[in-house]
Image (tube, grey):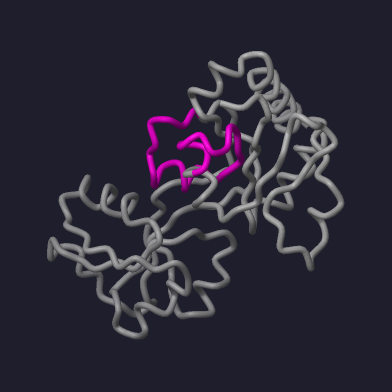
Amino acid sequence: MTERIIFAIPKGRILDEALPLMQAAGIEPEPAFFDESSRALLFATNNPAISIIRVRAFDVATFVAHGAAHIGIVGSDVIDEFDYSELYAPVDLGIGRCRISVAMPRDAVDDVQAGHIRVATKYPATTARYYHARGIQAECVKLNGAMELAPSLGLSGRIVDLVSSGKTLAENGLVETAIISHVSARLIVNRAAFKMMSGTIPALVQAFRELSGARAAA
């Protein structure tokens, strides 16, 4: 593995909260990172030993697990969905808080006792595990977005998705019926990189641990 550290960060909801933590840890992205017209995905930082890649949240875990990136920030929902053995998640950053929930139409009859249900979700592994533990076979229809449309269009009777305020569910005639897990962003590290780059990565992990602890205590 190269001694240059590749830091994977997610596009979307976590990014705005992650950047102040990274900056507090001494990692400042180059100006091009903040240029909305730029289509670049790899960026330099103020530290010549650290580069940043900006990818989809689900891809952060894959890049780090396979060693293409050494360290990253991603929601615990993604970590749980993939369950990569190569990932080490040593720090709960306390940002990006939300939950994975089951939701159904307000007036729907819960047919869960039938023993077989269809669920629209971008979390098929998490969903299948949740229902399997309850003795229910869940047929998961994989969607990457617009889950809220599935019940009204007959694609599924319920959905499993991330929920923050619940406003999107309400505006689409859905209500939460169960919370599968509470979610927050974690610092993740490739296990092999943590051992092989012992002169750099453990210190970086410790910096984030201290910042997260101070943030939680504030």
Whether residue 60 sits left or right of residue 23 in the image: it is left
Q: Image height check: is 23 above or below 53?
A: above
Q: Image height check: is 2 above or below 93?
A: above
Residue 79 counted in the magenta span: yes
Q: Image height check: is 139 above or below 215?
A: below
Residue lying furthest bottom: 153
Q: Which is more toward the observer, 215 or 83? A: 83
Q: Image height check: is 48 above or below 34?
A: above
Q: Residue 45, located in which quarter of the rendered image?
A: top right
Residue 100 percent location from the top left of the image: 45, 54
Q: Residue at x 83, y 40 (%)?
A: 28
- Quarter of the image with the N terminus is top right
Residue 101 percent location from the top left of the image: 42, 57
Q: Which residues are magenta?
A: 63-88
Residue 183 counted in the magenta span: no
Q: Which is more toward the observer, 126 or 179? A: 126
